[in-house]
Amino acid sequence: MSETFYTSCADVLALFQAQKDNLEALLDPQTGFAPRLRQLCEQQLSDIREEGNATPEGIEALRMECSTWALLQAIMPARKTEPPVQPSARALLSANPYTPTSSLAQATMAASRTLSELVVVREWLHDTAPPPPRPDASTGYWRFTKHRVTQGRWTGNTGRAVENVVREMDPDAVVREAEIGRSLAGDDASYDKALSYTLFAFVRAGNIEDAVKLCRDAHQPWRAASIRGSLLFSWPAISTVRQYDAAEEDEEVDPDLWYGNKRRALWKTTCTRAALDSRLSSAERALYAALAPSVQTSAVLKSACRTWEDALWATISVLCEDRQSEALARLGGGFWEPSRRELDAGDVGEGEGEGAGDEEEDAWRADVEQELQTLATAQVQEGLGADDPFHISQLHIILDRTDALLDDFASRLRDGAYDPESSEYPTMTRFFAHLCLYLQLIDIAVSPLAIQIILEAYLQVLEGAGQRSLIAMYAGALGDNAVERYALFLTSLALSADPAERRIALQRAREHGLDVPRVAVVTAERTIERALDTLPSSVKGPLPDLAKATLEPAEEAEILLVRSMEWTVVEADTYDTALEQANVILRHLLARGRVNVARLLLDMLPPELSAISTPEERAAEYLDYRQFFIAWETVERVAECQTLEVPQMSRDTRAAWLKDYGGLVSGAREQILKLLTMDWLVPETDIPGTDRRARELARIRQLFIPELILRLHGLLVSSRTHIPDNVRHALLLANVVADSRYMLFTEFAGENGRRLREYLAAVRTAVLAGLEHGGSDPFRSVL
């Protein structure tokens, strides 16, 4: 499926979401929601057929979607809008006893919502019927039969070939002479059979005029007259309600002329007899059953149905025809039709001419629903079966049970009844997703759970198709779950989206009415959870080896953890959350000794976070991290500066280097001492739910306080050749470590006192360094 098709469908949805209060625009027969999607499906169907790269199943699913949107386009306006008030059929007869039959039939249809909907569905079935096959051109009426009979008479040949063909050429000759074994010539019989099937297909498509024309082209005008008999009698010139007369709307019809069948009831009786006549061919019988559908002819009609749509059309045709015939009979037939008594239907009471009351209408609707329900298990010879999702959808739409339809489809999705890898799966999920949203737009109730499941399935299709830009729109329709679902999608982007794409994704959320700060926070939270699930624990196991942990490159999960902050630093509204999440990530990384990865995070955070002062505990912790990295980076700069010293330096260069070097060492000493004497990362003990945080902070102190002390001590001692006074500073540092006010010595207790032994050995080295210039007083260097 082309990427532009997804976008085009989303454009239609966006257009009508902006007009959700304009029911007229939503239901417009040409530019409404359903017509636009139908047109898109038709265009997509044409494109993939030209490209030739789609599976037959995929093409058929798209064709069915197109057909279903056409059904919605036809039936929803009838349900959501009130038709104009029309006079009843009895009122028309009371005002004008010569009211044409077509006007009475239209009044009958207008009085019954169920009948009106069935007629609309029948017209939809006409419009979506496959094009009828065309038989070969006819060169005359029964040409081969006529030639054989004529030749036999001219030659006097009365052989078997001549004896087996009819002797007369009238239309009834075949039936009349069949009893004595005579029939048409083989070619004529084949042509008549093909013609009957084609005429049936024209009637199936509601194309009576083309069927009539075909009969005339085939030199069978009598058959054309039989087919035209199905048209209701209409005479605009004598109708008192011309605004309701179909002929009045057709500018090409002369209102002074009548057309249609003035004795249609009699014609229908004749068609019924023909349909039930076993002497006729099955094709001929099916044609007459289609022209005059009724309970009597339904078996014949349904036997000619090959597809599920044919079976639906046959059922609805019988229901509509019987209902209209019954209503007309109740009226006594009017002036133009025989009375019910003449049709052996019994007497009509004085008050029965009016349309059925509400109770009878409800009872008939129940009968209609029961009859249509049988199509749920109808067997077909061709095409998709009754269990196809689109056939199920069409039947539920006709029955006005869209809520049950969506619940059923959602349940099947949840139970894994559909294969997401199948070629028709994207088409199905797209259709049902847009159906949910369409029904919402026109104020038809839809189960929230069904919407959630169906839209979730379609969102997965969009994600699989790489349609990132459309996720926010459809996620926004999830209501209370919209933020969580869109955040789930953004989380799935992982490292594939750069900061610019992430900003655009949040902007799309705003465009579709989502709470952007909430989306950013939830996305960051889910990303952090995802990353932490794959990383080692920050509170278990021995303290890491800093030398090794610092040199190892960042893992993918660590990069994901760091970049999770990109969601909450986009807007100032989420800075408070960003501060909290930054502390969580920094604690985890530093507790594992991942200094360089933590520094990546700190470098990407906006400076505004440092200005946040509440909550005080959170703000203080963040400032402690920044203080740590200032000290850590200064120590690293001292080491870098040491490497710049070379023996060949000039006096001025050496003096400048010594000045820089001394300043860096002094700065490192001041910063580390400040950090050591400021209760760095000492957690508050009265904050509930901070057990893990306290353990992480304690681990960080055990890891970095000894490291900072050892590093500072090493810098001071190693710099004594250039700055002799630094030996004294190194020995004074030991006083700070031992000071009970700061309790720094307790941080050396880990690893069985290994770091403490290292530090004591370093202090001993410093004492010895103080004796390098002579003397025996070890305290001289600190005085």
Image: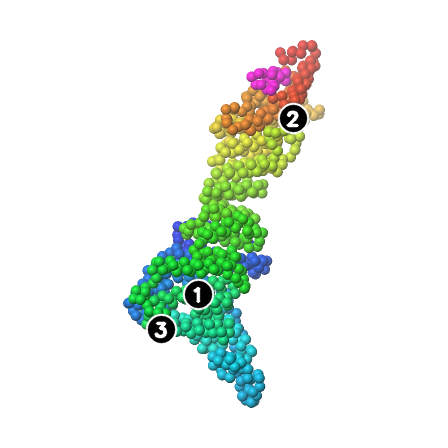
> Which secondary structure is most common in the magenta stretch?
helix
Residue 639 — which label? Answer: 2
Image point (46%, 65%), residue name: 314
Q: Whole-Å distance between the Cαs marked 1 and 3?
A: 24 Å
Residue type, mark 3 in image = Glu
Image point (32%, 65%), residue name: 352
Q: Whole-Å distance between the Cαs marked 2 and 3?
A: 117 Å
In this rendering, position of residue 67 left or right of residue 640: left
* Neighbour tally class for label 3: few under 14, some 14-19, many 20 plus, Cα within 10 Å: few
* Residue 487 in picture, x, y percent from top left: 51, 41
Whether the magenta-drawn stretch holds residue 736 is answered as: yes
* Residue 585 in picture, x, y percent from top left: 56, 32
688 vs 544, nearest the viewer: 688
* Neighbour tally class for label 1: few under 14, some 14-19, many 20 plus, Cα within 10 Å: many
Please report whichever mark, 1 or 2, sits nearer to the chain's N-terminal start: 1
274 vs 26, nearest the viewer: 274
Q: Name the residue under label 3.
A: 342
Label 2: state its secondary structure. helix
Outermost residue toward the top in this view: 776
In this rendering, position of residue 343 left or right of residue 221: left
Residue 631 — which label? Answer: none
Q: Mark 1 points at which residue?
A: 317
Label 3: state its secondary structure. loop
* Neighbour tally class for label 2: few under 14, some 14-19, many 20 plus, Cα within 10 Å: some
Residue type, mark 2 in image = Ala
Mark 1 or 3: in front is: 3
| Residue 26 appears anywhere in the view | yes
Q: What stretch is highlighted in magenta?
A: 729-746
